Amino acid sequence: MKSAKDYIEQHKDRFLSELIDLLKIPSISADSAYEKDVIATAEVIKQRLLEAGCDKVEICETPGYPIVYGEKIIDPTLPTVLVYGHYDVQPPDPLDLWDSPPFEPVIKKTELHPDGAIFARGACDDKGQMYMHVKALEYMTKTDQLPCNVKFMIEGEEEVGSESLGWFVTRNQEKLANDVILISDTGMIANDIPSITTGLRGLSYVEVEVTGPNRDLHSGLYGGAVANPINILTKMIASLHDENNHITIPGFYDKVEELSAAERAKMAEAPFDLEAYKDALDIDAVYGEAGYTTNERNSIRPTLDVNGIWGGYTGEGAKTVIASKAYAKISMRLVPNQDWKEITELFKKHFEAIAPAGVRVEVKPHHGGQGYVTPIDFPGYKAAEKAYESTFGKTPIPQRSGGSIPIVSLFEQELGSKTLLMGFGLDSDAIHSPNEHFGIWNYLKGIETIPMFYHYYANNN
Ligand code: BES
Ligand code: MN
Ligand code: MN
C-alpha cells in the first residue's frame, strides 16, 4: 500500500502548480467587478473534484454565487464526511503594500517557512487549505484507500457573510446529510506545535452614519457653532470602551460564557511567547481588556473594533470644511451564548441613544453569525487527534480561535452535526493582509494528515 508521504513526494510539483493556477483567478466576492472570475473559479473546482475521484459534481446555483457540490459515496452504510471550504477571497487592497502582485503567485522562503511559501491572495484563506482536501481525496481514491463516504461543499461567499450558503443548506438537508463536518479554514500554533481549533467567535457587523448639517460647511464660518459629524462620531466611538477596555453597551456582557479558573489555567498551558508576538507586529505593548491575557482577549472574550472610518476631505493638501456626514464600519466579535441579532439590536439602541442633539444617527446592520465550540470528547475530535499524532508525532493542542466562520453554527442547527476545524495555516500567514502566504510544508502536511483523519474516523465510528 502506497503511503501518503510517497504519493505526495511523487506528485508535489503538480499539487503546487494546480494550486497556483487556482490562485491566479481573482475570485473577490466583495467586488462585483470580479463576478466572472468568481464563477470561473467554481468551474475549475468542479473539474478538479471530478479528476480527484468524485463520482458526481454539480455547480449549484443560488441567489448569489454558486456552490460546488461533489460526492463519492462508496457504501451508504459507512460514515460520511462533509468537507466545507470557500473559493472566494478577500479584496487584495492596499495593493501597493504587496511585494508581488496578489494574483501572480510566487514562492519565497520566509523565516517560519524555510521550505518556501506561496504568496498570493487566498493562498491560505482558503484556496490553499481547501485544495488540500481535494488532493487528499485524490490520494485516497487513486490508491484505493478511501475508507468512507465523502461530500464536498465549496462556496463562493464566505468572505461576505455566506448568505447563499445558509439558503442552500436549509434547502438541501438530505443531500448534505453527514456524520461529521471537516473544515480547514483556521490556523495552528506553529509548525512544531500542532493544534486543533475548538472555538470560533461569533460576529455582528454594522455600519453607522452620522449626519449633521445638510451640506458641507466652511469650517471657519460655521466651526464651533454646529455639531461636526466627524468630531461627534469619533467621540461616540471612543465612549464604547471604558478605561478598562470593557465595552460600555448596556447588556453586552449579559450572556457571555465565563470560563472557570481551571479552564483558563488549561488554556494558559498553550505555548505563547509575548515578546515574539510583539516583535512580529512591531508594537511595544499589547492592549486590551483588563484582567485577561492576550490569548484570552483574542478568543474567549468579546470585542468591538472599528474596521474603517471616513468622511470629510482626505485628498491632497488642506480643505477647511465641516462635512455633512461621517461614517464607520464596526465589527463585534462575540463568544458562545451571545446572540448576534440581539447584540446588533443592543448596539443600535445604545448608539442611537448616545447621539447628542445636533446630529442624526443611522445604524445599518450588515451580517453576522453565532460563535461555535467543538467538543473534544467526541469520536471526530479523537480521530483528528490521532491523525495529527501520526503525522506530526505530537498530540495537538485544542485551542479556541478569535476568527469567525458563522456558517458553522448553522451547520449544527440545520444538519445536526459537529464541525472539526483542522487548520494548517499560521497567524503570521497574513490572511486578509498584503502578502498573504501559505507554507508549502503546511500545504503538504495537510494533504498527509487529512487521509489519516478519514482512516481513524472510519475505523472507530
Ligand atoms: N478563514 C477565516 C476565519 C478564520 C481565520 C477563523 C483564522 C479562525 C482562524 C474566514 O475566511 C474569515 O475571514 N471570516 C470572517 C468572517 C466572515 C463573516 C466575513 C472573519 O473572521 O472576519
Ligand atoms: Mn476563510
Ligand atoms: Mn477570510
Image (cartoon, helix red, strand yellow):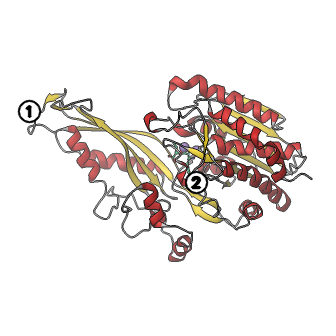
Q: Residues within 10 Å of mark 2 (few under 14, many from 20)?
A: many
Q: Residues within 10 Å of mark 1 (few under 14, many from 20)?
A: few
Above or below, comparing residue 19 to residue 344 in the picture:
above
Q: In the rendered image, which quarter contains the C terminus?
A: bottom right
Residue at position x 19%, y 28% from top? Answer: 216
Q: Nearer the viewer, residue 227 or 314?
A: 314
Residue 70 numbered tag: none
Is residue 175 visible in the rendered image? The answer is no
Q: Secondary structure at mark 1?
A: loop
Residue at position x 75%, y 40% from top? Answer: 13
Label 2 beta carbon less than 8 Å to ligand 1: no
| Three-letter amino acid code of the residue under disc 1 | Gly
Task: Measuring from the top left, give residue 399's x and y in whole percent.
Answer: 58, 63
Q: Secondary structure at mark 2?
A: loop
Is residue 345 visible in the rendered image? The answer is yes
Q: Nearer the viewer, residue 283 or 80?
A: 283
Above or below, comparing residue 221 to residue 419 in the picture:
above
Please state if 453 lies on the left or on the right of 39 as rendered: right
- From the image, tell me which residue sits under label 1: 220
Q: Report how far apart the C-alphas of labels 2 and 1 lie in the structure.
A: 51 Å
- From the image, tell me which residue sits under label 2: 426
Task: Measuring from the top left, give residue 15's x and y in whole percent.
Answer: 74, 40
Q: Nearer the viewer, mark 2 or mark 1?
A: 2
| Three-letter amino acid code of the residue under disc 2 | Leu
Residue at position x 86%, y 43% from top? Answer: 141
* Lower sequence index among marks 2 and 1: 1
Task: Measuring from the top left, give residue 457's x and y in whole percent.
Answer: 80, 58
Q: Nearer the viewer, residue 166 or 221?
A: 221
